Amino acid sequence: MMMDLHVHSAHSVDTDVEIKDILKTAKARNLDGLAISDHNEIAGSLEAFELAKEMEGFVVIRATEVSSSEGHIIAYGVDKKIPRDMTPQDTVEAIRRVGGTPVVAHPYRFWSGVGERVVLNTRFSAIEGLNARSPKSTNEKAIALAEKLDLGVTGGSDAHKIEDIGTGVTVFKSNIETEEQALEEIVKGRSKVYGKSRPAGSPKYVAKTVSEWFGRGMKRI
Ligand SMILES: [Zn+2]
Ligand SMILES: [Zn+2]
């Protein structure tokens, strides 16, 4: 089974894709499930979770991409927002307190990744090993770090546009019918990742990131 576990919707500040269009596209691309992981929001994810109950054989995992003080952490399996700007350790604890699974997103990404030192010093449940918007070299480093720490991996497109949905996926060998089963497989290290990466060091990407940052009044997402 294949699920894109990192998708943004119109509930993220930098995206305008509607939930129903995301679900329709994911189905059309033969995905078996997905997670909407909006920046510091949960409403879109909960909407998708409800809509998926009517979709035969399609699993939605609730999620939110939390901005910790050091970078992005995805809370899977939660039904409420997690406060932003806390330390990674406090963020992880807040996620676990509400029954969620904390996964470090794109750990090696410039600016919004928490970096290796934080991953080594924080008890995450898994590492995002494939993010289709990250360069191949950093995805490979993330997978190697997960292996070293004996942690499971997740994969996702980090899609902010409809056409990018499914460009990165988490692959499960067993049949997954619920959010709980998917998260258990990941935490036990039984998932794999597959997908494309961003071309290395694209200058266009750096320019875009910086101009968006200025556009937000120099605040990180
Ligand atoms: Zn992120
Ligand atoms: Zn993201």
Image (cartoon, helix red, strand yellow):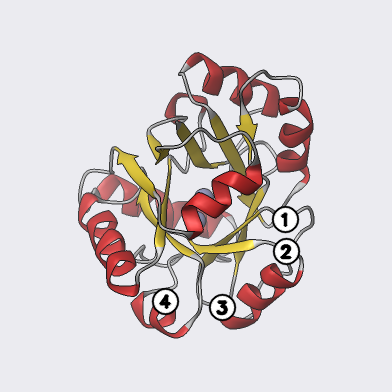
- Which residue position holds label 1? 78
Looking at the rendered image, the quarter that the C terminus falls into is bottom right
Residue placed most toward the observer, 111 or 123: 123
First in residue order: circle 3 vs circle 2: 3
Density class for disc 2 (Cα within 10 Å; few <14, some 14-19, many ≥20) is: some
Numbered mark located on residue 36 in the image: none
Q: Nearer the viewer, mark 2 or mark 4?
A: 2
State the separation of the CA atoms marked 2 and 4: 20 Å
First in residue order: circle 3 vs circle 4: 3
Residue 173 in which image quadrant = top left
Q: Nearer the viewer, mark 3 or mark 2?
A: 2
- Which residue position holds label 4? 119
- Which residue position holds label 2? 99
- Which residue position holds label 3? 88
**Amino acid on which the number 1 mark rests in the picture:** Val
Do callouts 1 and 2 mark residues in contact (Cβ within 8 Å)? yes
Looking at the rendered image, the quarter that the N terminus falls into is top left
**Amino acid on which the number 3 mark rests in the picture:** Pro
Q: Residue furthest top?
A: 28
Do callouts 3 and 4 mark residues in contact (Cβ within 8 Å)? no
State the separation of the CA atoms marked 1 and 2: 7 Å
What is the x, y in percent for residue 53? 76, 27
What is the x, y in percent for residue 106? 40, 59
Q: Is residue 81 above or below residue 18?
A: below
Q: Residue furthest front?
A: 174
Give the SS element for disc 1: loop
Residue placed most toward the observer, 56 or 70: 56
State the separation of the CA atoms marked 3 and 1: 17 Å
